[in-house]
Amino acid sequence: MPTKTKVKANRWDAQRKKLLDKQKQMMDSYARDRAAGNEQPEDGIQDLADKAANAYSKELNFSLSDADRDTLMQIDEALERLKENMYGSCANCSSDISEKRLEAVPWATLCIDCQELQEKGLL
Ligand SMILES: [Zn+2]
């Protein structure tokens, strides 16, 4: 007789796999861009402050867009919630997130209503 926790964990196996796949895919492309960025020739005459500023903006500019960074953070959060058996319920109002929504957006941590509120800046 499987425990309740186990049943619940298995229920989301497909979602977990999707999350991990997506995370890997995003990290891979991040790593590739990072490597490409490091190949850019250094300008030998810039002073330290410039260099620091440059490194900083370079770090930020590695092709991960804001949206990608958000997605990665949401994937992290979703994986955490899987661990804590909280996956599939809204982080704000605790109602169930529809399975359709989770299929489309496996890292969704808000139900559609709360997501709308968040997009309007009301959350
Ligand atoms: Zn909600």
Image (spheres, rainbow, N blue to C red):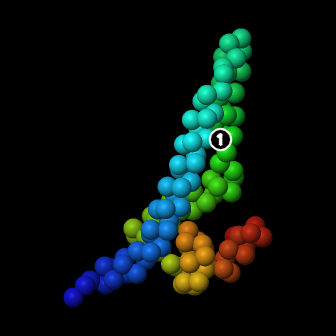
SS for dot 1: loop
- On the picture, is 92 further left or further right than 121? left
Classed neighbour count for the residue bearing mark 1: other residues with Cα under 10 Å, few (<14), some (14–19), many (≥20): some
Residue at the image position 52 percent from the left and 79 percent from the top: 89
Task: Please say if 1 is above or below 19.
Answer: below
Asked whether residue 92 appears in the rendered view, the answer is no
Residue receiving disc 1 = 62
* Percent position of residue 90, x then y: 56, 77
Residue at the image position 50 percent from the left and 78 percent from the top: 88
* Percent position of residue 107, x then y: 56, 68
* Percent position of residue 95, x then y: 56, 84
* Percent position of residue 29, x then y: 58, 48
Residue at the image position 49 percent from the left and 62 percent from the top: 21
Identify which amino acid the numbered label 1 is placed on.
Answer: Phe
Q: Quadrant of the N terminus?
A: bottom left
- Say which quarter of the image contains residue 39: top right
Q: Nearer the viewer, residue 32 or 114?
A: 32
Asked whether residue 52 appears in the rendered view, the answer is yes
